[in-house]
């Protein structure tokens, strides 16, 4: 008996595109499972859609409500890809949807904003996280014993199998690089303060990614006494080539970042790049300190770690080999396929049921936004710009995407409440901008 899985996703870009293209790939999974994907937004880039369709999986872009209802009715399982994106609630709320077996796959940790709403966790047939860190959220802890039994963790793995294993030697000099977002909701806002603790002659860090915040980072490097330490390379499509050119990755993230599986980190490890990370929940779930990388908690510890890697090339090579073997053994696409196919078969034993999305998420855009926020009082109470949130959490408020108020306001320009919140937060951002380096 064939199992038809319908995925509902806001888009197929970046990490979600890589994750779903790996999951629905033909040839390495069960022949009794087939997939369809509803992509709610028209894509800016077609890379992953082309890859998915070339493998034989249908992608339906921006369908109308009646078509969404029909596809849900035909599906055995509806897999909702969740990360708090504003395109999802309007597709699910309003007119009652046909009964379904709802599988939630969460692509944010939920530790901060956007959260994974407790009503979704309670009403879904199964909820799958991409990191064990999500098991520690207030929403997860609020579940009763039976509800917690429906939780699981399956890391998204897309592309690791195809990455080459470069030849690493102890004789190679230390070469550092960072791959990922340069937005301060993800990158640690005090990144230069950590780099300033490194006194290795000629030490530089390749910054691979869109050069957002370049001017701010360069100015902070000058203030910290390490001008020129950052080498901005811009966006690169040949990730393997960039990772082959480095052997250490200072992957220092904002303590309140939203990430989970951290594909950039796993790709680097798979290619024998030694990660140096902070003791944040998501990274701590992926790194074995002293075995597959190094975990630090302060700029001073970071400096000591980098000097140790520089002075002990044999140990650096050991960590590199361990990291590559660990990631390739633990996160192959085959493992993701087998785990999900097991979930699909068990779900088929359960009955479809009505899922009241409007009751769970709200009926209006402003409600949809508030119900995804860790600190909704920021918007419902008068904002006090003299008393911002935690000095690291505040950066997530100013994201222009990632489910922020700016993101929701751009998607729902006719909602006056969202526009008011956006304007007030923009004033807060302007007021705090000049003090960012002292945060």
Image (tube, rainbow, N blue to C red):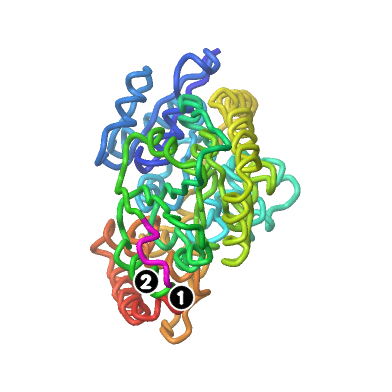
Prevailing SS of the magenta stretch = loop
Magenta stretch holds residue 431: no
**Label 2 belongs to which residue?**
222
Quarter of the figure with residue 60: top left
Q: Residue 202 bears which disc, if any? A: none
**Label 1 belongs to which residue?**
378
Quarter of the figure with residue 131: top right
Question: Which residue is depicted at the point 43% across and 32% down?
Answer: 72
Q: Tag 1, which secondary structure?
A: helix
Q: Quadrant of the N terminus?
A: top right
Question: Which residue is depicted at the point 30% across and 45% down?
Answer: 235
Question: Which residue is depicted at the point 66% across and 50% down?
Answer: 135
Q: Is residue 239 left or right of residue 149?
A: left
Residue 289, percent from left and from top: 68, 49
Q: Residues within 10 Å of mark 1 (few under 14, many from 20)?
A: some
* Label 2 vs 1, first from the N-terminus: 2
Q: Quick check: marks 2 and 1 in contact, CB under 8 Å?
A: no
Q: Is residue 147 visible?
A: no
The magenta segment: 225-230
Q: Is residue 107 above or below residue 305?
A: above
The residues tagged by marks 2 and 1 sit, at their Cα atoms, a distance apart of 34 Å
Foreground label between 2 and 1: 2
Q: Is residue 66 left or right of residue 245?
A: left
Residue 338, percent from left and from top: 60, 23
Residue 202, percent from left and from top: 43, 55
Q: Is residue 189 above or below residue 282?
A: below
Counting the numbered discs, the total is 2
Question: Which residue is depicted at the point 51% across and 28% down?
Answer: 167
Q: Is residue 164 visible?
A: yes
């Amino acid at each position: 008996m064939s199992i038809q899985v319908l995925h509902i996703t806001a888009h197929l870009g970046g990490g979600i595109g890589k994750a779903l293209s790996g999951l629905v790939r033909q040839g390495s999974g069960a022949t009794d499972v087939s997939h369809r994907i509803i992509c709610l937004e028209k894509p800016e880039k077609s890379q992953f859609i082309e890859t998915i369709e070339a493998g034989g999986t249908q992608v339906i872009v921006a369908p109308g409500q009646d078509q969404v209802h029909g596809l849900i009715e035909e599906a055995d399982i509806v897999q909702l890809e969740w990360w708090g994106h504003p395109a999802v609630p309007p597709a699910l709320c309003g007119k009652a949807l046909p009964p379904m077996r709802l599988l939630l796959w969460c692509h944010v940790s939920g530790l901060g904003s956007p959260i994974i709403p407790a009503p979704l966790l309670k009403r879904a047939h199964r909820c799958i996280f991409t990191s064990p860190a999500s098991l520690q959220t207030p929403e997860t802890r609020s579940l009763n014993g039976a509800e917690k039994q429906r939780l699981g963790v399956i890391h998204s793995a897309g592309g690791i199998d195809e990455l080459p294993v470069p030849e690493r030697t102890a004789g190679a000099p230390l070469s550092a690089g960072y791959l990922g977002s340069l937005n301060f909701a993800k990158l640690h806002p005090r990144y230069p303060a950590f780099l300033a603790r490194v006194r290795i002659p000629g030490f530089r860090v390749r910054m691979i990614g869109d050069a957002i915040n370049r001017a701010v980072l360069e100015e902070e490097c000058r203030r910290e006494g390490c001008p020129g330490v950052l080498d901005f390379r811009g966006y690169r499509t040949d990730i393997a080539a960039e990772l082959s050119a480095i052997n250490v990755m200072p992957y220092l993230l904002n303590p309140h970042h939203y990430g989970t599986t951290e594909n950039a980190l796993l790709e680097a490890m798979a290619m024998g790049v030694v990660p140096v990370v902070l003791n944040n929940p998501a990274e701590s779930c992926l790194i074995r300190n002293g075995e597959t990388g190094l975990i630090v908690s302060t700029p001073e510890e970071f400096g000591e770690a980098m000097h140790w890697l520089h002075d002990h090339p044999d140990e650096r090579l050991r960590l590199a080999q361990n990291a590559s073997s660990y990631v390739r053994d633990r996160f192959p696409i085959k493992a993701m396929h087998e785990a999900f196919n097991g979930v699909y078969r068990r779900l088929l034993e359960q009955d479809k049921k009505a899922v009241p999305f409007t009751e769970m998420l709200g009926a209006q855009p402003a409600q949809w936004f508030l119900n995804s926020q860790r600190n909704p009082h920021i918007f419902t109470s008068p904002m006090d710009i003299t008393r911002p949130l935690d000095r690291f959490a505040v950066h997530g408020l100013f994201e222009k995407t990632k489910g922020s108020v700016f993101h929701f306001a751009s998607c729902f320009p006719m909602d006056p409440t969202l526009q008011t919140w956006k304007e007030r937060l923009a004033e807060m951002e302007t007021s705090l901008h000049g003090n960012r380096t002292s945060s």
